[in-house]
Amino acid sequence: MEDMSGYPHELTGENTPMVSFKNVRKSYGSLVVLDDLDLDVTTGEMVSIIGPSGSGKTTVLRMLMTLEKINGGCIYVDGKPLTHMPKNGGLVPANERHLRERRADIGMCFQHFNLFPHMTALENCMEGPVHVLGISKAEARDRSEELLELVGMINKKDEHPSRLSGGQQQRVAIARALAMRPKVMLFDEVTSALDPEVIGEVTNVIRGLVDEHNLTMLMVTHQMGFARDISDRVCFFYGGKIEEQGSPAELFGNPQRERTQQFLSAVREAV
Amino acid sequence: MFDWNWEFAWEILPRLIVATGNTLIAAGAGYAIALVLGLVLAIAQRTPYRGLTFVVREFVEFIRSTPLLLQIFFVFYVGPQFGLRLSPWASGMIAIGLHYSCYLSEVYRGGLDSVPRGQWEAATALNMTIAQKYRRIIIPQAIVPALAGMGNYLVGIFKDTPMLSVIGVAELIHTANAIGSEHYRFLEPFTLVGLIFLAISLPAAGLIRGFENFIRRKLGLQ
Ligand SMILES: Nc1ncnc2c1ncn2[C@@H]1O[C@H](COP(=O)(O)OP(=O)(O)OP(=O)(O)O)[C@@H](O)[C@H]1O
Ligand SMILES: [Mg+2]
């Protein structure tokens, strides 16, 4: 088993990041997908992740959502280890109970929405609050309706997902994730499966979240313009590493690394 | 040659109706066992515990490759040697329930496999427990594609209940046979039994299809 002695049981101090990847490694068989990743995200920060296909962008989010186990290193959320738990004075891989405790801080929206087809929009939003958080139905309903209002879907609250467009489904999915009151929200290419004309309705909702909530957000996207508009920081991934990162102005305006320049010019040409 | 006796048929009908009730009870109880046990067997095969998965898989294969009749005899006659002394009724329902649970577990497995991985992931993102995922998200969706198969086996279990006659359960065939032996007339009892089976099996298929559509609508799936 990996020696975890170099990893603290808790991150303390004034500038404790909301999310912290420390030497995180991920591989599938012999394929190394993430190679000693270090990434800190401050509370309230919006970080965009860009990069070529297969560079490990989705994997970063999936590990943070605990959909994927890591092979090395440690992830901290809100100062406490997520992928590991303290035991006998050391850190050991987290069990399901620990994951359930720590996962409560994180919410995620997927490329293909993944709404529950057998529930209405409102029921999708109430499901977690009622059955996982254990709050009353009345309170969950109020909270969910408020969020459906926020994403502009209140008039469709009693529709099943099969009767909603992609953009509408994605907005419900955002409301569903927010209803759990996460501290960190993850967006994995939430506009990639959408028709061009409805992309705006989803990006506007996310734009609103940047202003209205003190949410920490990580967003994987292929929409460079959007990333440039709303991010505090942009990370360019290449081959399972962060090749370059910086403010949108720095990264898009004056990229330092050759691979970043190549990627950005290739993306611009494609548009 | 063809001497159908209406009076006799009328006279034995009450006994056959009682036997129909017994048949339906045996089929219903066996089916209830099969529905629950089948789900347990299906879910057990999806756990990360390799040993358990292997044992369950082999058990299902074993039951599916041996005749129901043998299983009925086994539970009834061999059970007592292991201290399991059961009435013909109990043995019959356990054997038939066990047998069909293995078939139903395959139907469930197909249904469970048909639920996209994204549904599991969305449930994880909402921080559900494994039990909540199955109960609230996965099973309601897995049931719909499984309904047709579940319905077929309901009719199948009903048509297999006559096998219980070999251990003396007073279902339809057993009763018809007894009547025949008492009166030396077999035409009426067996004809009536055939008609009773037909009268139940035929509408059942239609009802099952209607039920499937009802569930689909209720779950908002088209
Ligand atoms: N379950 C898996 N088994 C094997 N390999 C995988 C698995 N999931 C991802 N990979 C591989 O890991 C690498 C990184 O995948 P990831 O999905 O993180 O890429 P990405 O940057 O999100 O790409 P895209 O822009 O196409 O979505 C890819 O080479 C992919 O083939
Ligand atoms: Mg991806």
Image: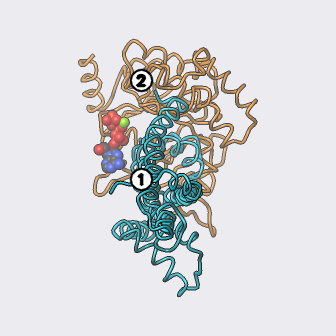
Residue A233 vs B104, above or below: the answer is above
Front residue of this view, candidates B20 and B191:
B191
| CB at disc 1 and ligand 1 closer than 8 Å | no
Residue A66 vs B85, above or below: the answer is above
Which chain letter goes with mark 2? Answer: A
Residue A178 vs A241, above or below: the answer is above
Total residue callouts:
2
* Label ID, residue A208: none
Return the residue found at the far bottom: B81
Which tint is chain A?
orange
Q: Is residue A75 left or right of residue B198?
A: right
**2 vs 1, front mark:** 1
Q: Residues within 10 Å of mark 2 (few under 14, many from 20)?
A: many
Residue at horizontal 48%, vertical 63%?
A: B176
Would residue A186 be seen by someone viewing this image from the given angle? no
Residue B198 position, x and y percent, is 43, 47
Which tint is chain B?
cyan
Front residue of this view, candidates A62 and A271:
A62
Q: Which amino acid lies under the numbered mark 2 shown in the image of this protein?
A: Thr
Residue A204 position, x and y percent, is 51, 16
* Label ID, residue B4: 1
Q: Which residue is mark 2?
A: A191
Cβ atoms under marks 2 and 1 closer than 8 Å: no
Q: Residues within 10 Å of mark 1 (few under 14, many from 20)?
A: few
Residue at horizontal 61%, vertical 34%?
A: A43
Which chain letter goes with mark 1? Answer: B
State the SS at label 1.
loop
Would residue B125 be seen by someone viewing this image from the given angle? yes
Q: Which amino acid lies under the numbered mark 1 shown in the image of this protein?
A: Trp
